[in-house]
Image (cartoon, grey):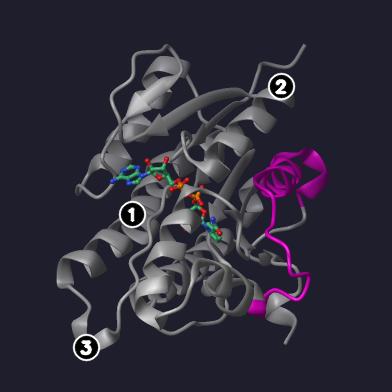
Amino acid sequence: MAEQKTALVTGALGGIGSAIAARLTADGFRVAQHDVVERVADDYFRADLTEVGAGEQLVAEVIARFGRLDVLVNNAGAQKVSPIAEFARADWDLVRSLSLDAAFECIKAAVPGMVSRGWGRIINIASAHGLVASPFKSAYVAAKHGLVGLTKSVALEVAEAGVTANAICPGYVRTPLVEKQIEDQMQVHGLSRDAVIRDVMLASQPTRRFVEAEEVAGLAAYLASDAARSITGTTIAIDGGWTAR
Ligand code: NAD
């Protein structure tokens, strides 16, 4: 029997990350779960990925404990909503460091082992905001567009070695991150909760329903499979038709 493949999911205690970790576990991967809170478990790794060097150290710890890393899912992320003229530099740094700098570090540390074994999967959870923009989300849109660019560049570098790199671009998925945004959007737009959900959030999502975290996890699992070996350097939208406009 082939040796069990190992996956790392960053932000694995969050809405989308937990669904991806559960799905990859069900599909037979040994899953290293990462998040920022303290927790003691054999398969759990704590790191604040806004800190310089934390991503590289995280991957090194996973490889030290699990022996290998075959699937890297860069999922940790955060959102800050503000008009550009009032956008705090600290919020810009937080969003960029978590969505882009940490992914760079984790990929950098994971690639050598993947290339040496001739098999690897890099799955970056970007966003519809990696493809199109919305107002008041300058940091997030910039970071996610950057993540898409990083994905493409890495894919070209490692393609011949049997390693793929892709970006998943979800529309609105009902998670704690989105719950928080409903509150923020109510402030920025001066609208009620129901109006934000209907007229701001799902206005751009033609299906008029939130994407489920399990749907994103299913796509990540497909990209992690052997069947997806020719899919690389691309973005896959799972956004209810948002970016078709
Ligand atoms: P979430 O808030 O439920 O999960 C994010 C995770 O990142 C949390 O577990 C959190 O603890 C972790 N995290 C936060 N700060 C951290 C730090 N400093 N260091 C390490 N980890 C940290 O959000 P989610 O909706 O599950 O988002 C997961 C990913 O999906 C994010 O990259 C997000 O941008 C992306 N995304 C979400 C949606 C959506 O509608 N929910 C849409 C498109 C893309």
- Res. 110 image quadrant: top left
- Name the residue tied to disc 2: 28
Residue 46 falls left or right of residue 145: left
Amino acid type, mark 1: Leu
Q: Is mark 3 within 8 Å of ligand 1?
A: no
x and y, in percent, of residue 116 in the image: 54, 35
- Near-viewer residue (242 or 60): 242
Residue 211 falls left or right of residue 154: right
Circle 3 crowding by C-alpha within 10 Å: few under 14, some 14–19, many from 20: few
Amino acid type, mark 3: Ala
- Name the residue tied to disc 3: 85
- Res. 243 image quadrant: bottom right
Amino acid type, mark 2: Gly
Instruction: Describe the element under mark 1 as helix, strand or loop.
Output: helix
Precedes in sequence: disc 1 or disc 2: 2
- Name the residue tied to disc 1: 98
Asked if the stretch drawn in magenta spans residue 211, the answer is yes
Q: Are marks 1 and 3 in contact (CB under 8 Å)?
A: no
Vertical position of residue 118 compared to residue 131: above or below: above
Q: Residue at x 36, y 79 (%)?
A: 188
Q: Which residues are magenta?
A: 203-229
Residue furthest toward the right? 227
Q: Residue at x 56, y 81 (%)?
A: 132
Mark in the foreground, 1 or 2: 1
Q: Quadrant of the N terminus?
A: top right
Q: Residue at x 28, y 24 (%)?
A: 38
Instruction: Describe the element under mark 3 as helix, strand or loop.
Output: helix
x and y, in percent, of residue 222 in the image: 76, 44
x and y, in percent, of residue 30 in the image: 59, 20
Asked if the stretch drawn in magenta spans residue 200, the answer is no
Q: Is mark 1 within 8 Å of ligand 1?
A: yes
